[in-house]
Amino acid sequence: MGHAPPAIEAVSWGWRHGGRSTWAVRHLDLVVQPGERVLLLGRSGSGKSTLLAGLAGLFDERGGGESEGQLRVFGEAPATSRSRSGLVLQDPEAQLVMSRAGDDVAFGLENRGVPTDDIWPRVRAALDAVGWAYGPNRPTDQLSGGEQQRLALAGVLALEPDLLLLDEPTANLDPEGAGLVREALARVLDHRATTLVLVEHRVAEWLHLVTRVVVLAAGGGILLDGPPSEVFVGHDELFARHGIWTPDHRGKRPARPLLAPQPESLIVTEQLSAQPPLADRPLFARLDLVVRSAEALAIVGPNGSGKSTLAHLLGGLHRPQAGQVSASEALAPGHAGSSVWQWPARRLVTRIGSVFQDPEHQFLTGRVADELALGPMRGGLPEAEARRRALELAERLHLDAVWEANPFTLSGGEQRRLSVATALATAPRALILDEPTFGQDRRTWDEMLSLLAGLADSGRGVVLATHDRALVEALADRTLHLPLGA
Amino acid sequence: MQLRRPGIANPTAFLPAANAVAKLGAALIVMLVAFLSRDPVTPAILLAGVGLAMTLTGLRVADLVRLVGPLLVAAAILGVLNALLTGTPVGSSPGAVVDRATIGLALGLRVAAIALAGSLALATIDPADLASGLIGHLHVPDRLAIGALASLRLVPILVTEWRTIGLARRARGVDAGRNPVAALRLALGALVTLLVSAIRRASRLALAMDARGFDGRTKRTMARPPRMRLADWLLLAASGALGVAAIAISMALGRWAFIFG
């Protein structure tokens, strides 16, 4: 046998999605040999996911996109070599097809026309390979996010791919879930000489699994390429400028002001409990908690422990099943002790701001300018005053450049800043955020940290429901741990 | 999460273990006979048969009551209302009163038979089994059946999302209070948000399915090919026999009436 073709060969490759004027990836020259394990880095929008989808053979020009240059996988066009590559995506909910674990792993095998008798042994082998703890009949909707991603990995492994493509497989997971996925992947790589291309923002935990790091430049081409021991040495400034995580990047909280405002209590919970319908045990029970001004309070705990539910209750968004969430005199002068969920929405937003995990859930208008002015106007400010405040906020959060844009067309980082800005527009004393750094690159992450620190320092009460340990370490004055199933 | 069907306590009971297409066929036979018969005797016999089938579902009694209770109440209300409001036999002579009662009774029993047969089938059919049954026995194109199955998985996710969008709007200072017009306008806006998100989710799911080879290039095989066993043929035969017997007994009593007659 002659010379084996490289696993991946890109020659000034580029891809433009249908309907877009700019190229998602351009001028890419890259050769990856079989067996290499590549960590692919780059700031949001540098085309990492596009490259993975291209390698998986998911693009064709009939869909309206356009390519340039050449991309080959094992010497063939990616669409032709499709059966040799396997792709795991970020969102576990969006890639499980079947309601039973074993059926889901079998799905890919059925599609490839594997005879029925050969399917189940391969399903079992793939489940074993990821360390699956349950039987094949486990319903997929009863799995944690980490378990779902393990299952998705098994579904791809059952197809025995020579090229494994992982697009931020742990971005949606809590640290425990992310650990499950890394452990499963480490197991797989111990037993197979699979070529790996991995995209992840937070790099430290993955370094022991990869042999090479490739950093994509935002404008096209490659910024850095080499073994981890070389790429991360002496390039701190370059990584910072491009907004890319390095293994030892720790956020630093801006210095606190010398004359910090005195903390006072804002929101008080008494004997607060929550139990989802059909669940056999409460998320949390009889919780007594005080949200104070001039303080950042972190609520942490695994997925499913009730962080979001608690954030919604503190935000006065719905009625608690048991217990009280009430306002202090400092939060609502003249309304001390009243239940926050009973307030009309327009009063609520001038006192407590809530920022949801997915910014798009909160957008109500077709223009950033209108989005920012909406809250103040509903709170009773005259239009001119509301517009003035909106512009001021847009400048402070660097949204003035997209002032006229539709919120749904903004980048992930811009959407995140806009959702925080809309909550701040009505000048609430308490701000409650659900996973504010979820899926953000380093640049947005750093911005979010200094913004939230500034809010706490200026006397606001900041509550974060998050599983971002780095953020909690850098920012939180106080931390509440919610265990799974209190 | 909220749309979960009742858990089947005993999955090896006759109906949960039976072939999905056979169950669907058996239910459709009962539903069709109940639909076509205008008299009270036929649906009463059908209901007795469906009542027997309830013992084969493997459901806990409490779950069974929760499943069929509301349907029976609804059917009873419908029957009573129809008896009171029907326009056909005019007057308050004893004969007219009996006629009214019969019309109401017949309608209530028919609705109950149709609803119960359908809900027993739905409660004991696993959607994945139905999809493979439709592909295997009835030669439904697999792109269609598997696609429908996959989109079914998104339904509970969208229900949760709908609730979240409602909360997110309150967090923006927008709620309807007691104004129904504002509530409608808000719901329409939230629906657009939900639709945008549903389309994104669906296209991501389609991408993930494509990446796992669901592209129509290869003839698919089945991990669990559906089989029609003797018991499944018996189920179909029993359902057919129940339908024939119901009509025959009703005819022997001189009561049977065809819906279009």
Image (spheres, coloured by chain):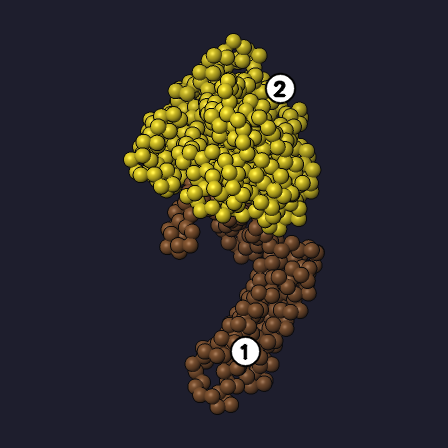
Residue A390 placement, left or right of B248: left
Numbered tag placed on residue A208 in the rendering: 2
Q: Position of residue B176 (x, y in %)?
A: 41, 50
Q: CA distance from mark 2 to mark 1?
A: 74 Å
* Direction front: furthest residue: A334
* Foreground tag (2 vs 1): 1
Q: Amino acid at mark 1?
A: Leu
Residue A31 placement, left or right of A27: right
Query: How many neighbours does mark 2 have within 10 angstroms: few (below 14), some (14-19), or many (20 or more)?
Result: few
Residue A362 placement, left or right of B63: left
Q: Residue at 55% x, 72% y: name it.
A: B76
Secondary structure of residue under mark 1 = helix
Q: Is residue A438 visible?
A: no
Q: What hue represents chain B?
A: brown
Q: Which residue occupies the foreground of this view, B163 or A461? A: A461
Q: Which residue occupies the foreground of this view, B116 or B90? A: B90
Secondary structure of residue under mark 2 = helix
For the N terminus of chain A, the quadrant is: top right
Relative to B224, residue A80 above or below: above
In the image, the chain rendered in yellow is: A
Numbered tag placed on residue B105 in the rendering: 1
How many marks the image carries: the answer is 2
Tag 2 subunit: A
